[in-house]
Amino acid sequence: MNPVMNPAMNPSKNPCVQSPRYTLRANALAAAVATVLLTTAGVGHAQNAVPPESAMIKLIRGLIQSGALEKSTGEALLAQAQTEAMAAQQAQRAAPAPVVAAAATGATAGAVAGEVRVPYIPETVRDQIRDEVKGEVMAQAKAEGWAAPNETPEWTKRIRVEGDVRLRNESRFYSGSNSDIQIDWAAINSGSGYDVNPNTNLNLPPLLNTRQNRPNQWRARARIGVLADVSDSVKAGVRLATGNDNSPVSTNQTLGGGLAKKDVWLDQAWLSYQPFEWMKLTGGRFGNPFVSTDTLFSHDLNFDGIAAQFEKMLPNKDITMFGSLGFIPLEYSKDNAPSNSQDKMSSESKWLLGAQVGAAWKVNEENRLRGALAYYDFHNVTGRVSQPCALYAGADGCSTDWTRPAFMQKGNTLMLLRNIALNPLDPANTPQPQYVGLASKFQLLDMNLRWDTKVAGYGLRFDGNYIRNLAYDEDGMWNRSNGGIVNNFGGSGGTTRADFKSGGNAYMFQATFGKPTPAARGDWNVLAGYKRIEPDSMPDGYNDSTFHGGGTNARGYYLGGSYALDKNAWVTGRWISTKEVFGPPLAIDTLQFEFNARF
């Protein structure tokens, strides 16, 4: 019986056949199996071998076990083989005994009634048929993904892991002539406030270390992220990182601590959607979407919220336009404040609106320019003086406590926030625990410029950054604080308006010679730069935490260099020397040695 003409292989009559293409492959396989079976059957009649249906079943089962046949298709072929075997047996019982005649010389005897003739098929032909059928079935299996050997699951191809590890030795050296009265305002804001009434509190406020060196401190940083290509246009990412605390600008973990285990934080968690080749939308917690330097935003800083990024190459292919737009929530007021009052405060939020445009120009093979202009509006971050609050009578905080910064380093001009009512029964001895807030508003104009060129065959890069706080206004700060400014005075010790020193400008420039980012073994670079950051040129909570210990009101130079010991592994050395811009003396020198690895 011809398997191709058998109704069992007809798609309209056999539900096991799944598609025309799959039917073609199954039919071809069935034809080849039947051909081999008939050959085996003919030999069996001559030698009284095992019944033919047993050989067919073994063959089909072998193909299923080897993965050459899908299980459902193999079962259909087994059912067909059993049916054909039964029909052949019935035909043999009804017909005279078959005679198979074949002369040794190749002569063929005349046909005899009831005789079944089996043509001789050479072994090489049988092997060729078997190999061709197997090759076709395996090719189809691989194309359709149902039996490809040595293949990993499809979803694993859409997920990748990346990360980095850094080991750092850091020494900080303080001048012996530094002022020893540098208040730790962040510690005051994170606690229950500092009582400024000398009649009820004789203790000094929390103070920063300004004179005792801190040599040879070992620190580590580890980050690991999982990135997923959900589809061609949707991607997702999650990253974990170390850190001493929840500081947004540092993932360093100081070693030691009695060998206690170290903390791990959620560093990133984002989704992105790219509806067009030139546009990407990202939401969640993600890396910096703006072109900037660590003068304004630390390299470890991540952003919450949503951002849109644009990039389009012009027709001449030498100029690429880019831009970013971000809505970044910084802080929300508490839902249940005050906690012990039926009258809850209204909803307040702090947020950052950022917009940037820029262009990258390939001047020629050795020269490239990149420029970017950005505007950042820090909304609702300025401190406010509260309504009178009777803390002595059990009031749970004051109306503007929420305006104190959630995170701060040092340098910004600060103001007292609480208007504390005095106890009429004992006004002189009424405790006055105070918080501080930012006195200035912040609307920043940020300009970045980069020039990449070559000298003697080596790369040379120049970076420049200028930042201007367009909202800087000394009169406005003093007016909104009602005279309650508490820092950024000159070194004379006076605290009047005449002693006040601040500014709204910042700038940096840096030169890097060699490979800016070492990646291959033998890559190297050396660099030198200078920064000047006036006290109210930017919020002090988001920039580099190493330069002058972080924050603003800092100026100084830095030198460094890197060398790649192997692929994606390099060492770095850095020397940073800084001092204050205004106010009491504060000079800090920092020496760092690092070993970095990226994977």
Image (cartoon, rainbow, N blue to C red):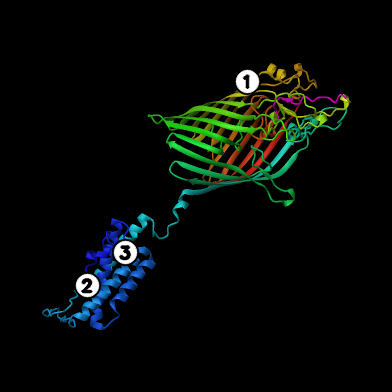
Is any atom of residue 527 visible in this view? yes
Q: Nearer the viewer, residue 529 or 406?
A: 406
- Residue depicted at 56% across the width and 31% down the height: 327
* Residue furthest front in the image: 342
Which of pointers 1 and 3 lies earlier in the amino acid sequence?
3
- Amino acid type assigned to the residue bearing label 2 in the image: Ile
Badge 2 crowding class, 10 Å Cα cut-off, few under 14, some 14 to 19, many 20 or more, is: few
Residue assigned mark 1: 471
Figure check: 513 above or below 103: above
Circle 2 is placed at which residue position?
A: 121
Instruction: Using the rendered view, name the quadrant where residue 238 is placed.
Output: top right
Q: Helix or strand or loop: what does disc 3 sit on?
A: helix
| Between 517 and 16, the one nearer to me in the picture | 16
The answer to if 420 sits in the magenta stretch is yes
Q: Which residue is mark 3?
A: 134
Residue 40 point in image, percent of width and height: 26, 76
Provide the residue span drawn in magenta: 410-424
**Residue 187, which numbered label?**
none
Is disc 1 placed on a helix, strand or loop? loop
Q: CA distance from mark 1 to mark 3?
A: 76 Å
User: As drawn, is 405 to the left or to the right of 116?
Assistant: right
